[in-house]
Amino acid sequence: MRLKIVSVGEAVLRQPARPLTAGEIRSAEIQQLIQHMRETVNDAPGVGLAAPQVGFPLQLAVIEDKQEYFAGLTAEQIAERERQPVPFHVIINPILHQQPGDEVEFFEGCLSVPGFTAIVPRSRQVRVLCQDETGTPRVIEASGWYARILQHEIDHLRGTLYLDRMLSRTFCSLDLHARLWKDKTIAEVKAALT
Ligand code: ZN
């Protein structure tokens, strides 16, 4: 079932989500929510979806990055983003540790801010302590684009959107980004706009 994705302006996107108990994680309701979130993010399509984006203030997000999603990027763009496929997985009750002093900047978007994008600085490397959909503790070491996805989704669980972190002068529509900035370097975009 495809769920309705809420947009910026809805209070649920601005509230801290609450952790799930072990019993809740195993419940039929949460297992069904995970399945519906998976179908919703695949359908969108997107690389991640947090429970507050479908109206549930719970510390739960689903992530999957597929080769086909970055087919439009050049080999050089894929390499500089350190982007590679990430299999579908679930993060619950995550704790984020960011590697300080190692930030990277790229355009980023969000299903809850449809039609727009902006340059967002993010840590290049992160460690995430969380539970999976069975309640089993997991430690995720990530770098590059996967680290960016994790930071974006965990932000959602704290009521934070990329809008709060973006270089606001680079904010633009996806149409305009495709026409003007898609093939420029981040340095060129910043030189022109900031
Ligand atoms: Zn988002």
Image (spheres, grey):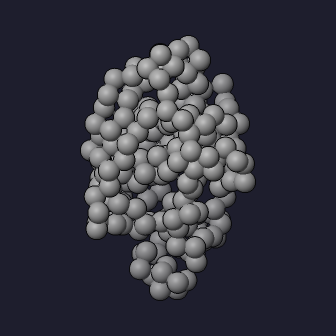
Snapshot quadrant of residue 9: bottom right
Q: Nearer the viewer, residue 73 or 45?
A: 45
170 lies above or below 140: below
Q: Is residue 66 visible?
A: no
Left or right of residue 148: residue 37: right
Q: Position of residue 95 (x, y in %)?
A: 37, 42
Residue for point 56% across, 44% down: 16
Residue for point 43% across, 51% down: 151
115 lies above or below 170: above
Q: Position of residue 108 (x, y in %)?
A: 51, 60
Q: Position of residue 152 (x, y in %)?
A: 48, 51
Snapshot quadrant of residue 49: top right
Residue for point 41% across, 80% down: 187
Q: How many marks?
A: 0
Quadrant of the frame with the N terminus: top right
Q: Nearer the viewer, residue 172 or 27?
A: 27
Q: Is residue 169 visible?
A: yes
The single residue placed furthest to the top in the displayed view is 28
Residue for point 47% across, 16% down: 23
